Image (cartoon, helix red, strand yellow):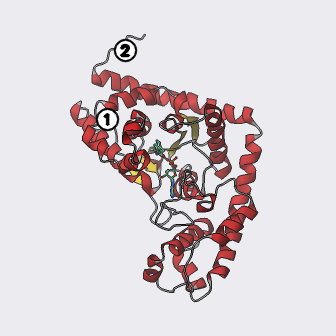
Amino acid sequence: MSEIRNNTVLSGVQPSGDLHIGNYLGAIKNFVSMQNDYKCFFCIVDLHAITVKQDPKILKKNTLEVAATYIASGIDPKKSIIFNQSSVPAHSELAWIINCVTRMGWLSRMTQFKDKAGKDKENASSGLFIYPNLMAADILIYKATHVPVGNDQKQHLELTRDIAQKFNRDFNCENFFPIPEPIIDKDISRIMSLKDGNQKMSKSDLSEYSRISLLDESDQIIKKIKKAKTADTVMPEKIDDILKLSEVNNLLNIYSGFSGLEKQKLIDQYKGKTFSIFKSDLSDTLVERIKPITSEIKKLMQDKHYLLGILQEGRNKANEVAKKTINDVYDIVGLLRNET
Ligand code: TYM
């Protein structure tokens, strides 16, 4: 255990809209469970959010809302460091150095850039293209050893590992940056749209019915699950048959993620039954688990002063660690920092 306690976790969430149950199951739930065993930094990545257009007023509100969601989900600001990325300048400073380490070819293979830039690549911001470098900086500035994320961030984590290795090698400073391990759950790291089991659940999906937000009221949750796509059969009993029904598999993953019950146990319970029974129990579980989080987020959002205090305290603690790393990096790279 003492070895684990020396390890550091960093992860981040963009303040780019209401968070959904994919963000919760794929990332935030793991943050909560890791905070007792690791030194944890949980960042609200506002600089990542502005790689696409944001309304400045809404961005500030969303930043506070992610802080409120972290706390409402069980992240304890006494144990974990909660802060927003732009308040710690060393993230951007290290990102520039990393821009000079990462190869263009590496970045051009990033599938998330291709997805987000879409057909109009020429019109995407250059920030969106170098986004993974800033993400690597977020992780490496704290010398994080473990990074809990959803499956969609896997490629960015692999890139971060390559960057850390190349930096250590290029500057002859073996082990300066640890090679971070992604923490990605098997089943709940890729929660899919409720309307299409082949599309990831996403904040930017035009249909509200594709996702369940952590701010949804109970009746909205029930309605969305009722409308969720399943299949024209009963619940199959074999996992291989379930895997062929991507929407059903997704709902089982969501149920398992929120109830803590093994997927196989749920299959045994519902095999041969209609999906309406399954959906009704699933909605009950979701309402039971999400309602306390929703009310706590809403309560915390009434106390802006408290949330700003948490972010300020987090910034001070994060700055202390980040400044030390960036000073060492400047020295290693040969940049003169004429400070007393
Ligand atoms: P973001 O803000 O898109 O999502 C936050 C976290 O939620 C996970 N996630 C999902 N997990 C399961 N199913 C889904 N449908 C789903 N959608 C999102 C994401 O994988 C992520 O863990 N680039 C990151 C933010 C970031 C970051 C970092 C993460 C910036 N710097 C450093 C880790 C470490 C992002 O856009 O996450």
* Discs 1/2, front: 2
Asked if residue 133 can be seen in this view, the reply is no
Above or below 216: residue 320: above
Of the pair 229 and 63, the residue shown nearer to us: 229
Left or right relative to 327: residue 52: right
Whole-percent x, y for residue 61 in the image: 66, 37
Q: Earlier in the sequence, mark 1 or mark 2?
A: 1
- Left or right of 72, for residue 112: left
Residue 264, percent across and down? 52, 79
In the depicted view, which residue is nearer to us: 14 or 175? 14
At x 51%, y 86%, the residue is: 237
- For the point 47% across and 51% down, the residue is 148
Dot 2 lies on which element?
A: loop
Against 111, is 144 above or below?
above
Horizontally, residue 238 falls left or right of residue 103, namely right
The residue shown at (60%, 45%) is 17
Q: Quadrant of residue 310?
A: top right
User: What is the three-letter code of the residue carrying label 1?
Assistant: Phe
Q: Could you tell me which secondary element the residue under label 1 belongs to?
A: loop
The residue singled out by tag 2 in the image is 337
How packed mark 1 is, by other alpha carbons closer than 10 Å (few <14, some 14-19, many 20 or more), is some
On the rendered image, what quadrant is the C terminus found in?
top left
Number of residues whose C-alpha sits closer than 10 Å to that of mark 2, classed few (under 14), some (14–19) or many (20 or more):
few
Q: Residue at x 54, y 36 (%)?
A: 46
Left or right: 282, with 200 as reference point? right
Q: Above or below — where is 38 with respect to 185?
A: above
Residue at label 1? 176
